[in-house]
Amino acid sequence: MSSNHDFDIEEKIASLILAFSHKREVILEVLKRNNYGIDASALELSEMPVVEQPPSHQPPQFRQSNNNNNNNYPSNRQIPQQPPPQYQQYHQQQKPPQQQQQQQQQQQQQQQPQQQQPQQQQQQQQQQDKERSELIKDIENLIGNNSLDQSTIYAVYQQSNKSIDQTIKTIKELTFDPNEELKKIEAEIEMRKKEEEAMLEAKKQKEKQEQLKLTEQQRIEREQKQRMERAEREQQQRLREEYERRLNMELQKKLEIERQEQELTRRKQLELEQIMILKKQEEAGLRILQEQREHQEKVRLAKEKEEELKKRTMEEEARRSAIRAQEIARMSKQQQLEEEAKRLEQQKRQEAEFILALETKSKEANLMQQQAFFLKQKEQENLQLIEKQKKEIYENQIQIDILKLKEMESQNQSKSMLEKAQQEIQDLKKRLADGETKFNQETVKKTSDEEELKKQIQELEQQKDVLRKQIQELEVVQKPRLEQLEQELKNKELELHNTIISNQVSLASSLEENSTDTIVVHWNLENKFEDGTPYWIGVFPTHQPKNDRYLSFKHIEGKEGLVSFPSIIPGHYEARLFKDKYTLIQKSSSIQVGPSVTLSAHVIGDEISVTYKVNSETGANTKDWIGIYHPIQRNKHYIESLYASTSGTITFKSPRIPGLYEIRYFLHPTKYNEQAKISFEIIDNDKIQVLSESQSCLTLSPDQEFRVEYVVNTTAPSSSDWVGIFPVDEINNKHYIHSKYTTSAASGELTFRAPLKTGDYEARFFSYAKGKYIAHKVSNKFSVFPQSN
């Protein structure tokens, strides 16, 4: 490998020596500097000046002509020989200084007396012989084939003052043959001609290869560009899908959070309802307890009344006993009085007998009269006493009669009060029994009402879920729009705050009659004009909220005037009048530049067919494009976009989420300034339905086969979508009875077996995109009852 490399270098050196007049070492140095590149070396050598050498030391050189004419070389002119490929150039011209110095030293040593040892002489002789052989070999290589022997060549060398160039010249003169030289020249010319033809062919092949390489490189670059564009489109598609996936995940998270919040709210409501029910039960218990307490209080009062009546009866009895004792005492006293009266009558009889005895007796008449007088007084006193006692007895009798009447009244009153108390006790007992019966009935009714209420709550929860999803989907669509509207409202308020509101300032924009792409703006500042204050008018896209994003602007002078803006690309624009830098004074109404566009959109299944017509002579441009947007999105944030075609119809994939959307048409070269737009709505037509032979009565027997049909377009279909059979009152979506996966299709039918347990059931569709256990749609209810014989 090293010899081949050296041979290539020598070939390059020989070629450059033939082409240029520089020294061999200079050419070698230039090749080394240019990393052995022949083209760069030739360019550098062509720019380098040639150093002239003395004639005795420089061999004749010839520069190769670009012409292929053979007459450039005369027949009697010697052809310069090519230097040997494997030796340095100083062998062709002169010895190096070091070798000359050694030769001089040797000559001096020969002239001096031979004082050196024989060994040194022998070494010098060997060195001389070696140099002699190398020199002769170099000269033979330079001369080529000749009939001279080595001794003759060395003799000529010594006679030529040891000059290689002179030696070669002398030998050539000695061995010169014109015919042979002519043949050599012709052969050399033919060889060079062939070399030039080979070089031209190689150059053509090289150019052809370079052309092929350039074509291949361009093809590779095109393929790389196509791959990069395809990769960029795929990357954009992936980013869009990733954005949609993240958006769906965020929506799912929001839905899950809202579902959890609603679940917590529902649980709180249930807890509150349970607490209310417990409170009601507690209040009913307290009410019943209060009624029992009141009843016990009434019973106690009745007992107290009864005891009081008993006490009063006992007191009445005691009083009656006292009255009876008084009556007995009165009767005994009356008896005593009667006895006393009998005794007095007897005494009267005795006194009468005594008076008669006194009358019979005449003696003691005065004494008897006195005694009779005393007896009469005593009798009167006794009579008065009897009268008084009779009066007291009569009064006592009256009091006894009054007491008897009072006793009878009190007995009647106590009897009526007792009967009334007993009646009240009976009424209380009856009311208590009625209250217990009513409480039991109310408890039973409350239990049934609670069960019914639970069913209603479950149905309401299902309706809430449906409404909640619709509300969430509406919020997903409307919330950004509301936020944007709020932001726009704030911006408008800020603009109104910073804008000089004046009815005297007017700004009107219109299109020029002869040029439909030129906007002419008329301004009138009236008394709001201030001298020395700069004013300017800018043309803005109507949807652009920022005042520094103008399409074109011009400074104005004076209170009133016209200014025109030519070459405006299609779109909707408005003119804005500013003072100083960005102090907004007035806005004009919106104006449309370019042809009008007629749009219509039709939702067909999961596709949207858009029909458009550009009302111009050229019609639609294939560089025009159409995008689908949420109504609140700006023109850069499209959901999907497609280029227009000359057919006037284009088809989009329908968005999954129901709601309002917009189709916006953009003319070329407009970027994000729509020319026309139209709204359309995606309706939620997703459903899941239990099918039976009789749709009017969905009643199945246990283990009976039935079909479930589903249609779901608002979520992306997946092989992980599934349908489950649940009891109607089952809240946990993990507690299914039967389940089956779908076939990754947006619609289809599945076959199930009816549950063995009687009751009401329903089918639920679960979308993997929304969550594994989040019900997307719920079917109609069906019942399972054993078949009657």
Image (tube, rainbow, N blue to C red):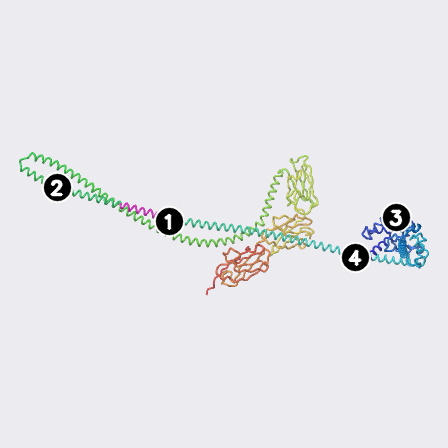
Q: Residue 292 carries which label?
A: 1
Q: Is residue 572 visible?
A: yes
User: For the magenta stretch, what is the residue range?
Assistant: 292-314
* Residues at marks 3 and 4 touching, judged by CB atoms closer than 8 Å: no
Q: Which of 625 and 710 is in front in this view?
A: 710
Q: Which residue is the site of mark 4?
A: 209
Q: Where is residue 453 in the image (x, y as percent from the top left)?
A: 47, 53
Q: Distance between the residues labelled 2 and 4?
A: 189 Å
Circle 3 residue: 51
Assess disc 2: are there few (<14), some (14-19) or many (≥20) residues with their C-alpha within 10 Å of its C-alpha.
Answer: some
Q: Distance between the residues labelled 3 and 4?
A: 39 Å
- Which structural element holds mark 4? helix
| Residue 620 picture location, percent across and down | 68, 52
Kind of residue indicated by mark 4: Gln
Nearer-N-terminus badge (3/2): 3
Q: Residue at x 48, y 54 (%)?
A: 456
Q: Callout 4: few (<14), some (14-19), or many (20+) C-alpha neighbours within 10 Å? A: some
- Residues at circles 3 and 2 in contact by the CB criterion of under 8 Å: no
Rendering coords of residue 174 (x, y %): 95, 56
Secondary structure of residue under mark 3: loop
Three-letter code for the amino acid on which mark 1 is drawn: Gln
Q: Using the numbered discs, state the Cα–Cα distance from disc 3 to disc 1 in whole angstroms.
A: 141 Å
- Mark 2 vs 4, N-terminal side: 4
At label 2, the amino acid type is Arg
Name the disc covering residue 768, or none: none
Which label sits in the foreground, 3 or 4? Answer: 3
Residue sitting nearer the eye, 51 or 693: 51
Choose between 540 and 614: the one closer to the eye: 540
* Residue found 9% across the figure and 35% down from its top: 371
